Amino acid sequence: MGAYENVHERLKALGLYTIENTIDNYLSNAKDKSTMEILDHLLSEEVKSKRSREYEAKLRYSGFPFRKTIEEFDFTFQPSIDKSVINDLLTLRFVHEKENVVFLGPPGVGKTHLAIGIGMKAIENDIQVYFVSAIRLIENLKKAYNDRSFDYRIRTYSRFPLMIVDELGYLPLNKEESNLFFQFISSRYEKRSTIFTSNKSFSEWGEILGDEVMASAVLDRILHHCTVINIRGESYRLKERKKNMLASERIGEKK
Ligand code: ADP
Ligand code: MG
């Protein structure tokens, strides 16, 4: 085999598929480039595509129900949110300091969107994130407890420097469930960061968690190092629906 075939075979053997796919074309257009410039270009393209494959894999692994960035969030629609607080969270200092974040507010105000936006930023910065709904989390903890794999499950969650626990408070927990949830919270306390979203105010957490003593034990740990963002505003979903309704009315008028 000649050098041409050898190069292609070796690039494939090394998994350098971006170079393998582009090298012929690039070389034929790079007559005026030095060898170093050519190598630099090909290698940097390979590194870029490797990074984006890794980013994509981490995003898929994170379990986000949808992908929305902070840039896609319209802050003018939600003036109760202090943008500087969000900007501070985007520095990810809170993850390094093992602090928590709680988004509170009625449905549709963007709690999950903001949590995912911060999560995506974390992944960009090589921080592995795991998103789970509170209902799923409790189910998984219960299942693990019944299988006697609770410690293993907790250790698995502990691998994630950042978890997002979404929609706490849609279902009230029984005594066993709130106990397992408490153990989950304790396992992350001052060790790992967690973002929570909830449509219930802290005073209502007693109802979610079955009793006041359990609620205050949980809240104590979550809130000890925590940024709380209370969103008081209109549902964005409702706004969209109203806009669509107005548009269709207008179309109706024209007829
Ligand atoms: P919540 O979790 O508070 O119920 P979501 O974050 O799921 O609300 O938001 C509902 C939908 O509206 C999502 O598609 C989200 O991207 C969008 N949304 C909410 N608030 C905004 C906003 N201020 N700017 C842009 N999109 C928004
Ligand atoms: Mg939500």
Image (tube, rainbow, N blue to C red):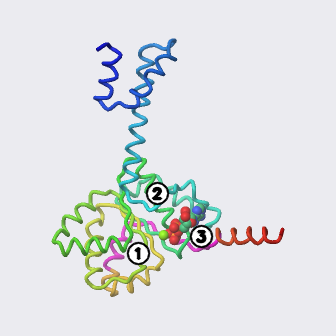
Mark nearest the camera among 3 and 2 is 3
Q: How far apart are marks 3 and 2 (CA)?
A: 21 Å
Q: Is residue 110 visible from the viewing direction of this image?
A: no
Give the number of marks: 3
Q: Nearer the viewer, mark 3 or mark 1?
A: 3
- Up-down relation of residue 57 to residue 157 (above or below): above
Q: Residue 168 carries which label?
A: 1
Pointers 3 and 1 in contact (CB under 8 A)?
no
* Nearer-the-camera pick, 178 or 217: 178
Q: Which residue is drawn at the image coordinates 28% and 29% (left, top)?
A: 13
Picture coordinates of residue 176, whole percent (x, y): 25, 82
CA separation in Å, label 1 and label 2 = 18 Å
Vertical comparison of 16 with 237: above or below: above
Horizontal and vertical percent position of residue 98? 34, 60
Instruction: Count residues near mark 1 (Cα–Cα under 10 Å), then give few for <14, some for 14-19, many for 20+.
Output: many
For residue 98, above or below residue 126: below
Is label 3's Cβ within 8 Å of ligand 1?
yes
Task: Return the residue at label 3.
Answer: 237
Q: Earlier in the sequence, mark 1 or mark 2?
A: 2
**Of pointers 3 and 2, the one earlier in the residue sequence:** 2
**Disc assigned to residue 118:** 2
57 in the magenta segment: no
Answer with left or right where residue 143 lies relative to residue 171.
Answer: left
Please tell me which residue is depicted at 28% across the width and 62% down the height of the picture: 157
User: Which stretch appears magenta?
Assistant: 217-239
| Membership of 223 in magenta stretch | yes
The three-letter amino acid code for the residue at tag 1 is Leu
Q: Which mark is residue 148?
A: none
Image quarter where the N terminus lies is top left
- Type of residue at label 3? Arg
Q: Where is residue 146 in the image (x, y as percent from the top left)?
A: 19, 75
Q: Nearer the viewer, residue 170 or 178?
A: 170
